[in-house]
Image (cartoon, rainbow, N blue to C red):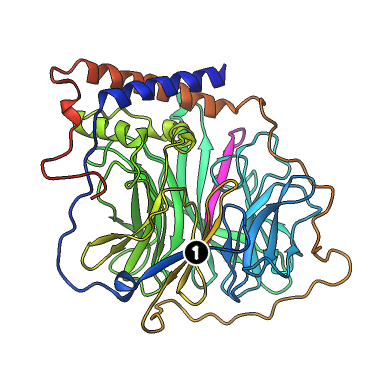
Amino acid sequence: MMRARLGRLVVTVEVLVLIVASWPALAAASPGGSPGPYFTAPFTVHTNSHTFGQDPSWTPDGQVLSNEADRSGVEQVYRSNLDGSQLSCLTCGQAGPNGFAQERAQGDWILFCSWRGQAVTFGKPCLGGVGTDLYAMRADGTDVTRLTMPGMAFEPPGVAFDNYHPAWSPDGTQIVWTHIGFNDLSDGGTRWTMLVSDFDQTGSQPPRLSDVRVVGPATDTGYETQVWAPDGSGFLYTAMGRGQSGWLNLELYFVRLSGHGATVEHPIVSHLTDDSPAWDEQAVFTPDMKDVIWMSSRGSPSWYQTVVTAAQQTGFDPPMQNETFGAMFVLTIADPEFHTDLYELDLSTRATRRLTDLNRIVPEFYFDPSGRRLLWSEGANGATIVGHFQLAAPPKEVGPRVRRVAPRRATGHGAPSSTPPTTGGPAAAPPGAPLPGPVVQGAVLLETQLNKLAQQLQGLAHGSSCCRPAVGSSPGG
């Protein structure tokens, strides 16, 4: 039944595509100031010799953490060189799936995500869905510790949940992540919050999260936390906007937590992107904090842009985006025409340039320790790409100086294996398994709202003329 409902959603979307003939282009950047060195440096990309899973990340010493399937098909956390040599599995033999590994700047702890022990799951750990908890382990894979669990203040009893897209602060003392509480519609629907916590680890004691604070309250939107600013003043995030931004329009923001009058209790939010109806998501600062690089679908318009454009130009703005965020995400990325590329925003001039012209999928990406290379994998079964800024001089970094800790070497029992094992923990729910109730509720509501938008457009005197681009604009900017 659920898959039939998703099929009806696709038909509704196809009707909207036929009604809305075009989309507005990017807003022109306002000139002024001088662009930073990253904005003017040539940027080249090449396919890496070794292919990693979706969200590979660099370690402080230039190695790569990635999630790969072990011999039993369960995704586990691996460490290797960029070319795949010196491969070592850090979580093999443990229940999974495990992934989204990020090493602390000190080089001593790895933050990762897992479904282990969860009865209700959907999506993938830390990439959006249901059932993810945050874990930490030593750099050698030992001393695995669960960081989030039932009973914590942000986990209401009996409510399906997810903790995803975490990131270390530059000094390694804090973690930011997005928490989702799948409350029933009668209780306001899905609640998305952005949480910041101290990473408390002293001596031989197991690490824990302390002083957990909400910096993005549960409102009529969905959040996705990105990485911290290099100076630790705040972090980037994406959220679906309303009003001028448009219904279900995913935009990029920066929330400042310190400096210029901001505190964790009273954060200051800046809207960075331009209300384009494109899907704007993953983002990082350049090391000098002069630019922001983000992923956008604006160069390859799909039905998502059509829907957002129609909502923008007709003033369609129903509530409960918080409930429909998940369903819209699934439908958007499932569209075979959905492609993204990297774009760069110069923060002093507001100028934007397109960095890549791949027209594929660019998910999570990160800078290497040199500040010159970006690394990402193009989703399921896609290539791993390395992007290179050809800077004339070493990049100026503004982050804190962190003393790296000598990594522990695993010996004896519990040492990570360099060969994937033949057994593993439970994998994701098999095809055809029932979807969690909250996911179904979101899809039902989205279907209803899309049908209302289609009816509203069909009733206009001038039909699709409502949604033509502004005079003098062109798709792609």
Above or below, comparing residue 230 to residue 327 in the picture = below
Viewer-nearest residue: 452 or 131: 452
Rendered location of residue 1, percent (x, y): 57, 16
Q: Which residue range is magenta in the image? A: 153-168
Whether residue 449 is visible, yes or no, is no
Is residue 164 inside the magenta stretch? yes
Residue 80 in the figure: left or right of residue 437 = right
Rendered location of residue 29, percent (x, y): 19, 58
Is residue 55 inside the magenta stretch? no
Identified at 68% across, 38% down, the residue is 428
Identified at 44% across, 31% down, the residue is 323
- Quadrant housing residue 259: bottom left
Rendered location of residue 168, percent (x, y): 53, 64
Rendered location of residue 154, percent (x, y): 54, 45
Identified at 88% across, 65% down, the residue is 413
Residue 154 in the figure: left or right of residue 391 = right
Q: Residue furthest left?
A: 471
Identify which amino acid the numbered label 1 is placed on.
His
Whether residue 469 is visible, yes or no, is yes
Q: Residue furthest right?
A: 412
Above or below, comparing residue 60 to residue 314 in the picture = below
Q: Which residue is mark 1?
A: 46
Above or below, comparing residue 150 to residue 231 in the picture = above
Secondary structure of the residue carrying numbered label 1: strand
Identified at 46% across, 42% down, the residue is 192
Above or below, comparing residue 434 to residue 428 in the picture = above
